[in-house]
Amino acid sequence: TTFLLLALTMTLAWHITEISLEALFTEAHKAARVWRGLFSPNFENLLLDYPKPINDSILGSLIETLFMALLATTFGALIAFPFSFLGARNIMQGSKIRMAIFWIVRSFFNAFRSIESILWAMIFAIWVGWGPFAGTLALMLHTIAALGKLYSEQAEHIDHGPVEAVQSAGGSRIQMIRHAIMPQIIPPYLAFTLYRWEINVRMATVISLVGGGGIGRLLFYFKRELDWARVGAIVICIAVIVWILDYVSGRVRERIV
Protein backbone atom coordinates (compact mmCIF):
# COMPACT_ATOMS: atom_id res chain seq x y z
CA THR A 1 0.00 0.00 0.00
CA THR A 2 2.79 2.40 0.90
CA PHE A 3 4.60 1.63 -2.37
CA LEU A 4 1.43 2.18 -4.42
CA LEU A 5 0.77 5.48 -2.66
CA LEU A 6 4.34 6.62 -3.30
CA ALA A 7 4.14 5.57 -6.96
CA LEU A 8 0.84 7.41 -7.39
CA THR A 9 2.30 10.53 -5.77
CA MET A 10 5.37 10.49 -8.01
CA THR A 11 3.25 9.92 -11.13
CA LEU A 12 1.00 12.81 -10.19
CA ALA A 13 4.01 15.03 -9.52
CA TRP A 14 5.50 14.05 -12.90
CA HIS A 15 2.37 15.21 -14.74
CA ILE A 16 1.77 18.35 -12.67
CA THR A 17 5.33 19.58 -13.23
CA GLU A 18 5.01 18.84 -16.98
CA ILE A 19 8.30 16.94 -17.14
CA SER A 20 9.21 15.99 -20.70
CA LEU A 21 12.36 13.99 -21.36
CA GLU A 22 11.66 14.29 -25.07
CA ALA A 23 11.87 18.08 -24.93
CA LEU A 24 14.99 17.86 -22.79
CA PHE A 25 16.90 16.05 -25.54
CA THR A 26 15.20 17.12 -28.79
CA GLU A 27 15.28 20.84 -27.97
CA ALA A 28 18.87 20.83 -26.71
CA HIS A 29 20.05 22.73 -29.79
CA LYS A 30 18.20 25.83 -28.57
CA ALA A 31 20.52 26.02 -25.57
CA ALA A 32 23.66 25.62 -27.67
CA ARG A 33 24.25 29.34 -28.20
CA VAL A 34 23.59 29.99 -24.54
CA TRP A 35 26.28 27.51 -23.54
CA ARG A 36 28.65 28.91 -26.18
CA GLY A 37 28.24 32.36 -24.68
CA LEU A 38 28.59 31.18 -21.09
CA PHE A 39 31.80 29.31 -21.90
CA SER A 40 33.17 32.22 -23.95
CA PRO A 41 32.82 34.97 -21.33
CA ASN A 42 33.24 38.61 -22.28
CA PHE A 43 35.12 40.47 -19.53
CA GLU A 44 35.14 43.76 -21.44
CA ASN A 45 33.07 45.44 -18.72
CA LEU A 46 34.91 43.98 -15.75
CA LEU A 47 36.37 47.43 -15.01
CA LEU A 48 34.84 49.50 -17.80
CA ASP A 49 31.37 50.92 -17.17
CA TYR A 50 28.67 49.61 -19.49
CA PRO A 51 26.70 52.51 -21.07
CA LYS A 52 23.12 53.45 -20.25
CA PRO A 53 20.88 52.19 -18.75
CA ILE A 54 23.47 50.33 -16.64
CA ASN A 55 26.25 52.90 -16.14
CA ASP A 56 28.33 50.49 -14.07
CA SER A 57 31.02 47.84 -14.36
CA ILE A 58 30.95 44.23 -13.20
CA LEU A 59 33.49 44.96 -10.47
CA GLY A 60 31.55 48.03 -9.31
CA SER A 61 28.33 46.04 -9.07
CA LEU A 62 30.09 43.22 -7.23
CA ILE A 63 31.44 45.67 -4.66
CA GLU A 64 27.94 47.12 -4.29
CA THR A 65 26.55 43.62 -3.72
CA LEU A 66 29.17 42.78 -1.09
CA PHE A 67 28.49 45.99 0.82
CA MET A 68 24.73 45.45 0.62
CA ALA A 69 25.21 42.04 2.20
CA LEU A 70 27.69 43.39 4.76
CA LEU A 71 25.42 46.22 5.94
CA ALA A 72 22.35 43.98 6.00
CA THR A 73 24.18 41.32 8.00
CA THR A 74 25.80 43.76 10.43
CA PHE A 75 22.69 45.75 11.29
CA GLY A 76 20.51 42.66 11.14
CA ALA A 77 22.74 40.86 13.65
CA LEU A 78 22.92 43.89 15.96
CA ILE A 79 19.12 44.13 16.04
CA ALA A 80 18.55 40.37 16.28
CA PHE A 81 20.99 39.97 19.18
CA PRO A 82 18.96 41.68 21.95
CA PHE A 83 15.66 40.36 20.62
CA SER A 84 17.01 36.81 20.67
CA PHE A 85 17.00 36.85 24.47
CA LEU A 86 13.34 37.90 24.42
CA GLY A 87 12.67 34.99 22.07
CA ALA A 88 14.38 32.35 24.26
CA ARG A 89 11.94 30.37 26.38
CA ASN A 90 14.42 29.48 29.13
CA ILE A 91 15.24 33.16 29.68
CA MET A 92 11.69 34.52 29.54
CA GLN A 93 9.88 31.84 31.53
CA GLY A 94 8.72 32.66 35.04
CA SER A 95 5.79 35.02 34.51
CA LYS A 96 2.85 35.42 32.15
CA ILE A 97 4.06 38.83 30.93
CA ARG A 98 7.50 37.52 30.02
CA MET A 99 5.99 34.50 28.26
CA ALA A 100 3.64 36.78 26.33
CA ILE A 101 6.67 38.78 25.15
CA PHE A 102 8.39 35.52 24.25
CA TRP A 103 5.49 34.40 22.04
CA ILE A 104 5.25 37.80 20.34
CA VAL A 105 8.98 37.91 19.53
CA ARG A 106 9.15 34.27 18.42
CA SER A 107 6.06 34.75 16.24
CA PHE A 108 7.74 37.76 14.63
CA PHE A 109 10.84 35.69 13.87
CA ASN A 110 8.79 32.87 12.34
CA ALA A 111 6.49 35.12 10.32
CA PHE A 112 9.12 37.44 8.85
CA ARG A 113 11.56 34.58 8.23
CA SER A 114 8.94 32.75 6.17
CA ILE A 115 8.64 35.71 3.76
CA GLU A 116 11.46 35.62 1.24
CA SER A 117 13.78 38.58 0.75
CA ILE A 118 12.61 39.01 -2.84
CA LEU A 119 9.13 39.99 -1.61
CA TRP A 120 10.58 42.46 0.90
CA ALA A 121 12.71 43.88 -1.93
CA MET A 122 9.56 44.46 -4.00
CA ILE A 123 7.96 46.32 -1.10
CA PHE A 124 11.02 48.44 -0.31
CA ALA A 125 11.63 49.17 -4.02
CA ILE A 126 8.21 50.83 -4.11
CA TRP A 127 8.78 52.45 -0.71
CA VAL A 128 12.26 53.97 -1.12
CA GLY A 129 12.85 53.50 -4.85
CA TRP A 130 14.82 50.96 -6.88
CA GLY A 131 18.44 50.48 -5.97
CA PRO A 132 20.83 49.06 -3.38
CA PHE A 133 19.07 50.80 -0.46
CA ALA A 134 15.88 48.81 -1.08
CA GLY A 135 17.91 45.62 -1.41
CA THR A 136 19.82 46.28 1.80
CA LEU A 137 16.61 46.89 3.74
CA ALA A 138 15.06 43.69 2.38
CA LEU A 139 18.09 41.61 3.29
CA MET A 140 18.35 43.23 6.71
CA LEU A 141 14.72 42.51 7.63
CA HIS A 142 15.02 38.87 6.63
CA THR A 143 18.36 38.65 8.45
CA ILE A 144 16.84 39.98 11.68
CA ALA A 145 14.18 37.26 11.64
CA ALA A 146 16.49 34.44 10.52
CA LEU A 147 19.34 35.22 12.92
CA GLY A 148 16.92 36.04 15.73
CA LYS A 149 15.43 32.55 15.42
CA LEU A 150 18.87 30.89 15.31
CA TYR A 151 20.20 32.99 18.18
CA SER A 152 17.20 32.32 20.43
CA GLU A 153 17.28 28.57 19.75
CA GLN A 154 20.99 28.52 20.57
CA ALA A 155 20.27 30.31 23.86
CA GLU A 156 17.66 27.66 24.68
CA HIS A 157 20.16 24.80 24.27
CA ILE A 158 22.92 26.05 26.54
CA ASP A 159 24.41 24.15 29.48
CA HIS A 160 22.19 25.05 32.44
CA GLY A 161 24.88 24.34 35.03
CA PRO A 162 26.36 27.88 34.98
CA VAL A 163 22.84 29.35 34.95
CA GLU A 164 21.87 27.44 38.08
CA ALA A 165 25.13 28.46 39.74
CA VAL A 166 24.42 32.17 39.18
CA GLN A 167 20.82 31.77 40.34
CA SER A 168 21.84 29.89 43.49
CA ALA A 169 24.26 32.71 44.29
CA GLY A 170 21.38 35.19 44.15
CA GLY A 171 22.31 36.71 40.79
CA SER A 172 19.81 38.78 38.82
CA ARG A 173 18.47 37.86 35.38
CA ILE A 174 20.88 40.35 33.77
CA GLN A 175 23.81 38.78 35.65
CA MET A 176 22.62 35.34 34.57
CA ILE A 177 22.68 36.42 30.91
CA ARG A 178 26.06 38.13 31.24
CA HIS A 179 27.99 35.51 33.18
CA ALA A 180 26.24 32.21 32.41
CA ILE A 181 24.70 32.55 28.95
CA MET A 182 26.85 35.01 26.98
CA PRO A 183 30.12 33.02 27.19
CA GLN A 184 28.31 29.99 25.76
CA ILE A 185 26.50 31.68 22.89
CA ILE A 186 28.99 34.21 21.50
CA PRO A 187 31.07 31.69 19.43
CA PRO A 188 28.05 30.08 17.70
CA TYR A 189 26.44 33.52 17.26
CA LEU A 190 29.52 34.72 15.37
CA ALA A 191 29.51 31.54 13.26
CA PHE A 192 25.82 32.02 12.41
CA THR A 193 26.48 35.64 11.46
CA LEU A 194 29.35 34.80 9.13
CA TYR A 195 27.29 32.12 7.43
CA ARG A 196 24.41 34.58 7.07
CA TRP A 197 26.72 37.02 5.25
CA GLU A 198 27.43 34.29 2.70
CA ILE A 199 23.69 33.74 2.26
CA ASN A 200 23.05 37.47 1.88
CA VAL A 201 25.66 37.77 -0.87
CA ARG A 202 23.84 35.06 -2.83
CA MET A 203 20.41 36.50 -2.09
CA ALA A 204 21.53 40.00 -3.12
CA THR A 205 21.98 38.66 -6.65
CA VAL A 206 18.39 37.41 -6.81
CA ILE A 207 16.62 40.43 -5.30
CA SER A 208 18.07 42.59 -8.06
CA LEU A 209 15.36 41.08 -10.25
CA VAL A 210 12.77 43.23 -8.47
CA GLY A 211 14.85 46.38 -8.06
CA GLY A 212 17.20 45.55 -5.21
CA GLY A 213 20.41 46.75 -6.88
CA GLY A 214 23.72 44.91 -7.00
CA ILE A 215 25.34 42.57 -9.52
CA GLY A 216 22.03 40.92 -10.36
CA ARG A 217 20.97 44.13 -12.10
CA LEU A 218 23.67 43.57 -14.73
CA LEU A 219 23.01 39.83 -14.83
CA PHE A 220 19.32 40.16 -15.61
CA TYR A 221 19.88 43.06 -18.03
CA PHE A 222 22.35 41.08 -20.15
CA LYS A 223 20.14 38.01 -19.92
CA ARG A 224 17.23 40.05 -21.26
CA GLU A 225 19.49 41.31 -24.07
CA LEU A 226 20.55 37.68 -24.78
CA ASP A 227 24.18 38.73 -24.31
CA TRP A 228 25.26 35.35 -22.97
CA ALA A 229 28.99 36.12 -23.16
CA ARG A 230 28.61 38.94 -20.64
CA VAL A 231 26.23 36.78 -18.58
CA GLY A 232 28.97 34.15 -18.49
CA ALA A 233 31.50 36.70 -17.26
CA ILE A 234 29.17 37.81 -14.47
CA VAL A 235 28.38 34.22 -13.43
CA ILE A 236 32.10 33.43 -13.21
CA CYS A 237 32.75 36.55 -11.10
CA ILE A 238 29.86 35.71 -8.76
CA ALA A 239 31.10 32.12 -8.41
CA VAL A 240 34.63 33.29 -7.58
CA ILE A 241 33.40 35.77 -4.96
CA VAL A 242 31.09 33.19 -3.35
CA TRP A 243 33.88 30.59 -3.32
CA ILE A 244 36.29 33.02 -1.64
CA LEU A 245 33.68 34.02 0.96
CA ASP A 246 32.81 30.39 1.62
CA TYR A 247 36.47 29.47 2.11
CA VAL A 248 37.35 32.44 4.33
CA SER A 249 34.22 32.28 6.50
CA GLY A 250 34.59 28.50 6.79
CA ARG A 251 38.12 28.87 8.13
CA VAL A 252 37.03 31.62 10.53
CA ARG A 253 34.09 29.51 11.78
CA GLU A 254 36.47 26.61 12.43
CA ARG A 255 38.56 28.86 14.67
CA ILE A 256 35.53 30.30 16.47
CA VAL A 257 33.48 27.19 17.23
Image (tube, rainbow, N blue to C red):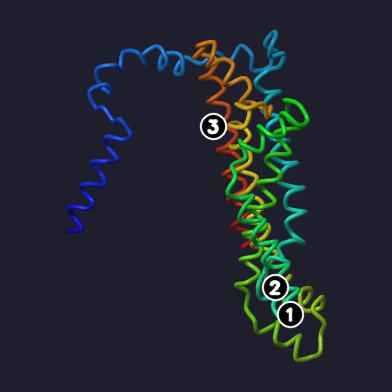
Distance from Cα at disc 2 to Cα at disc 1: 6 Å
Is 130 located above or below residue 53 in the figure?
Answer: below
Q: Which residue is mark 1?
A: 95
Where disc 2 sits, the SS reads helix
**The N terminus lies in quadrant:** bottom left
Q: Which residue is mark 3?
A: 239
Q: Nearer the viewer, residue 124 or 183?
A: 124
Name the kind of residue labelled 1 in the image: Ser
Q: Quadrant of residue 35?
A: top left
Sequence-wise first label, 2 or 3: 2
Is 109 located above or below residue 132 in the figure?
Answer: below
Name the kind of residue labelled 3 in the image: Ala
Residue 141 at x, y percent in the picture: 70, 45
Q: Nearer the viewer, residue 176 or 128?
A: 128
Q: Quadrant of residue 173?
A: bottom right
Is 207 located above or below residue 9 in the figure?
Answer: above
Where disc 3 sits, the SS reads helix
In the displayed structure image, the side of residue 251 where residue 129 appears, left or right: right
Q: Which residue is mark 2?
A: 99
Name the kind of residue labelled 2 in the image: Met
- At horizontal 30% and vertical 30% (from top left) the residue drawn is 18
**The C terminus lies in quadrant:** bottom right
Where disc 1 sits, the SS reads loop
- At horizontal 72% and vertical 41% (from top left) the residue drawn is 70
Distance from Cα at disc 1 to Cα at disc 3: 50 Å
Whether tag 1 and tag 3 are in contact, CB under 8 A, the answer is no
Whether tag 2 and tag 1 are in contact, CB under 8 A, the answer is yes
